[in-house]
Image (cartoon, grey):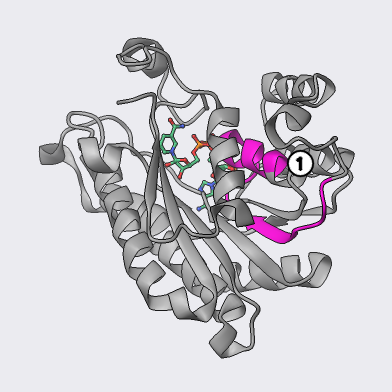
Amino acid sequence: MTERMTERMTEGVAEGVSERMTGRTTGTAARRGTALITGGSRGIGAAAAVALAEDGWDVGVNYRTRSDEADQVVAACEKLGRRAVAVQADVAEADDIERLFDAVTAELGQIGAVINNAGVVSPSGRVADYDVARLEQVFRINTIGAFLVAGAAVRRMSTERGGQGGVIVNVSSRGAVLGSAGEYVDYASSKAAVDTLTVGLANEVAKEGIRVLGIRPGLIETDIHEEGRLERIGTTPPLGRPGKVEEVAALIAFLASDRASYMTGSMVDVAGGR
Ligand SMILES: NC(=O)c1ccc[n+]([C@@H]2O[C@H](COP(=O)([O-])OP(=O)(O)OC[C@H]3O[C@@H](n4cnc5c(N)ncnc54)[C@H](OP(=O)(O)O)[C@@H]3O)[C@@H](O)[C@H]2O)c1
């Protein structure tokens, strides 16, 4: 988590952002259960972890390499009166995912919400120049990882398997629809598969007490972008500015909550109209 984001989060809490958003005082929201978020150490995932904590969830914060930043997110959740734990795991590895779910369950109790957020982009380039290593990397993390995380969630939450139901929120990208020509069509395609996963899985598990939803962020201010990209294309209309992580996090917290109880199988854009 960047220093700027820590400041923004702390400022947000101090200014009573949570009261304005939820009508509740910080730290007094009723406990909703345990949420697990992949890629929760930075960017959208870090902001979503804090938004979920504000909304009453104890939070399992997954990261791949940045343990210090994950620890800061855990501290921000704890400051809101929630329990939280940071767990290292690579979502591209099935064994890691099992260990992640088991560790969060052991520490925080049965998982009721899973935010399938971890993701990477490829370097800018054209399709004609992609090699196998590049394609394997982006599909392995963004697509296979999302499938493995969703599968692990269903095995634990399905009422047909002894679970208590729950919700899965998949973080796709507006690029899945726009195609990301000249930059990373492979990334956009890896996210289009996440859109299809969302619809297909939602139908598969609706009768097992699990809602499955997806979001498609547009250009959001995080470290995922190459130098200068946000300035170059972040100002395109309609809204003409990049989005903030908190604007995506608020949507994730809403979809994970009972306030979205009649929603499943939907993709929701949070992309400034792009
Ligand atoms: N920012 C945007 O404009 C935008 C737009 C559309 C969609 N998205 C999607 O939103 C999600 C979050 O993006 P972001 O912008 O917040 O990215 P970010 O700032 O680069 O953060 C990425 C997060 O994912 C984690 N991660 C990466 N690979 C992982 C792996 N193999 N296993 C476990 N964790 C892994 C990172 O962990 P470490 O900190 O340990 O490295 C970090 O917490 C991604 O799926 C991305 O595709 C972002």
Location of mark 1 (residue): 54
Q: Which residue is depicted at the point 37% across and 49% down?
A: 267
Left or right of residue 172: residue 43: right
Q: Residue at x 88, y 38 (%)?
A: 79
Q: Is residue 38 magenta?
A: yes
Q: Give me the residue at 62% from left, 61% from top.
A: 113
State the image coordinates of residue 57 (x, y, percent, origin top left): 75, 53
Residue 237: percent from the left, percent from the top? 30, 14
Q: Which of the 4 image quarters holds residue 216?
A: top left
Considering depth in this image, is 79 or 247 the residue closer to the camera? 247
Disc 1: CA contacts within 10 A as few (<14), some (14-19) or many (>=20): many
Q: Is residue 33 magenta?
A: yes
Question: Would you say residue 257 is visible in this rendering?
Answer: no
Q: The C terminus is located in which quarter?
A: top left
Q: Is residue 205 above or below residue 263?
A: below
Which quarter of the figure is the N terminus placed in?
A: top right
Q: Which residues are magenta?
A: 29-51
